[in-house]
Every structure is written in C-alpha cells, then in structure tokens.
Amino acid sequence: MSQGLGGILEKWRESWKAWRTAFFVILAVLVGLNFFIHPHHPHFGLDKYPGFFAGFGLVVGLGMVIIMKRIIQPFIARKEDFYGD
C-alpha cells in the first residue's frame, strides 16, 4: 500500500525530534573524525586545526542571517497593506 510522497513527508514531520537527533549525531561524528583525519596539505593557516570548517560555516551562516535581518530587510520590507486587500 503506497501512501505517496505526502504520507512519507507527514511521517518525517511527526518524527522531527529523531531527525534532529540523527543530524546532530552525524555532525558530532564528522567533527570528531576531523581530529583523527587531517587534511594532507592545508591551503591556509587556520584550516589545519580540527573542526575549523565546521566553525567557519557556523560563523559565516550566522553572519549572513544577521546581515540579512538587520541591514537588508529594512530596504525590502513592505507594510502589511502594501498590495491592497
């Protein structure tokens, strides 16, 4: 009995805590492996440290969100009744 894509997505939505836990475990394992598996030839000074790219991605992602929210949104935001009823 096939439930289709909607049924599958609904089951995944109901088990969001399990998905979140699984993703955090995978992330922790990958960062942990970075302590044992080193890049052969680091191209920059900081990328020789374990977990650098995970931290770099976190900082850059948060920076992009802050820039978008604080600087860009006031320019593109419209009032609630901008398009009429």
Image (tube, rainbow, N blue to C red):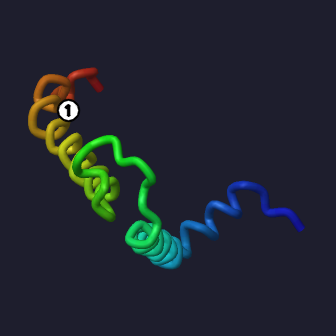
Residue 54 picture location, percent across and down: 33, 58
* Tag 1: amino acid: Glu
The residue that appears at 70% across and 63% down in the rendered structure is 7
Taking 43 as reference, is 48 above or below it?
below
Q: Residue at x 46, y 66 (%)?
A: 37
The residue where tag 1 is placed is: 80
Q: Is residue 23 above or below residue 65?
A: below
Of residues 10 and 79, the one drawn nearer to the viewer in this rendering: 10
Q: Position of residue 55 (x, y in %)?
A: 27, 58
Query: Residue 19 vs residue 48: left or right?
Result: right
Residue 72 versus residue 11 in the image, above or below: above
User: Is 32 situated left or right of 5 in this image?
Assistant: left
Q: Secondary structure at mark 1?
A: loop
| Quadrant including the C terminus | top left
Res 73 seen here: yes
Q: Image quadrant of residue 83?
A: top left
Q: Residue at x 55, y 75 (%)?
A: 15
